[in-house]
Amino acid sequence: MKKILVPTDFSEYAMNAAKYAAEIARKFEARIYFLHIVDMPAVETGIIPGQTRADIAEGLFILKKVKKDFRELFAQDFLKGLNVAEAVQFDGVYESVVEQAKKHEIDLIVMGTHGSSGYVNDFFIGSNTDKIVRLSETPVLTVRDEVKSPSFKNIVFASDFGEGVEASFVGIGKLIKLFDAKVEMVRIITRDDFYYAAPMLSLMEDFAKRQAIKNYECHVFSAETVQDGINEFAQFKNADLITTITHGRRGLAKLINGSVTSDLMKKSPLPILSVRAHNK
């Protein structure tokens, strides 16, 4: 873990993500790249056809404010002693995040979320949020609330342990090993997706052995919905982090898909780490 990307709009929720990213960066001596996206393309050049002097003046004012916001952010105590950098982009949210992640060979993206209504101040909204989580090649960790004294010792991995999960687990497995964490592996069952416990637990045990997970427990947990089950189980286990594999629109499996992950991000008080499934 050497490079972390934190998209920010300097809001309270982005600050929660920054604090969590700082704890990870301090633990692994990683560099944090803070990214702010301005919705005024090429405003520095003033060469957009039809652009007026007022547009240019407004753009310069916005850039000046962004610089001030970055100075205030970097002056925060929780960032002292850390290696940080800033970037300002003018493309769309998804395009900017993907571009910066590739450019800097980012290991982890950490983003702040805003409860049930999505991302605050329209910095990340609806389709942008889902698109980043669903399609990003880089693992995405979302943080809704401020996490006091973050710990990375007890991690929930929710899956159906079906086809495609093993190949996609690699990214999560690396972080689990880095954190030296215990893994609470769980298969949520509902009335619409019932599965007998004994064969599922056996499947999970085999999965753990193939993945060389040393400190783990296997669970089958019933709930009204998958989202509720993951949250209830994580609270029951006093977990520090929830991890999922997001299967996007065409699921390799039924358990975790884009809508489930999106709902978790909005409702769970715990950070959510999502890794994109590798389609075969």
Image: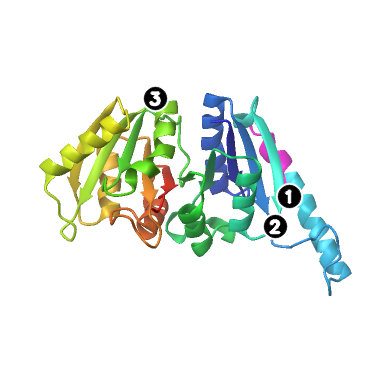
Task: Give the residue drawn at x 19%, y 57%.
Answer: 193
Counting other residues with Cα less than 10 Å from the Cα at mark 2, is it few (<14), some (14-19), or many (20 or more)?
A: many
Lateral position of residue 24 relative to residue 51, left or right: left
Q: Amino acid at mark 2?
A: Val
Q: Amino acid at mark 1?
A: Val
Quadrant of the rendered image containing residue 185: top left
| Residue 249 in the image, given as x and y percentages of width and height | 39, 62
Counting other residues with Cα less than 10 Å from the Cα at mark 1, is it few (<14), some (14-19), or many (20 or more)?
A: some
Camera sees residue 211: yes
Spatial CA distance of label 3 from label 2 is 38 Å
The part of the chain drawn in magenta is: 69-76
Tell me if residue 155 comes above or below residue 121 in the rendering: above
Lateral position of residue 145 relative to residue 198, left or right: right
Task: Give the residue drawn at x 67%, y 39%.
Answer: 73
Residue 175, magenta (yes or no): no
Do callouts 2 and 1 mark residues in contact (Cβ within 8 Å)? yes
Mark 2, residue position? 38
Counting other residues with Cα less than 10 Å from the Cα at mark 3, is it few (<14), some (14-19), or many (20 or more)?
A: some
Front residue of this view, candidates 126 and 62: 126
Q: Amino acid at mark 3?
A: Asp
Mark 1, residue position? 66
Mark 3, residue position? 180
Report the mark closest to the observer, 3 or 2. 3
Task: Give the residue drawn at x 58%, y 31%.
Answer: 2
Do callouts 3 and 2 mark residues in contact (Cβ within 8 Å)? no
Front residue of this view, candidates 59 and 250: 250
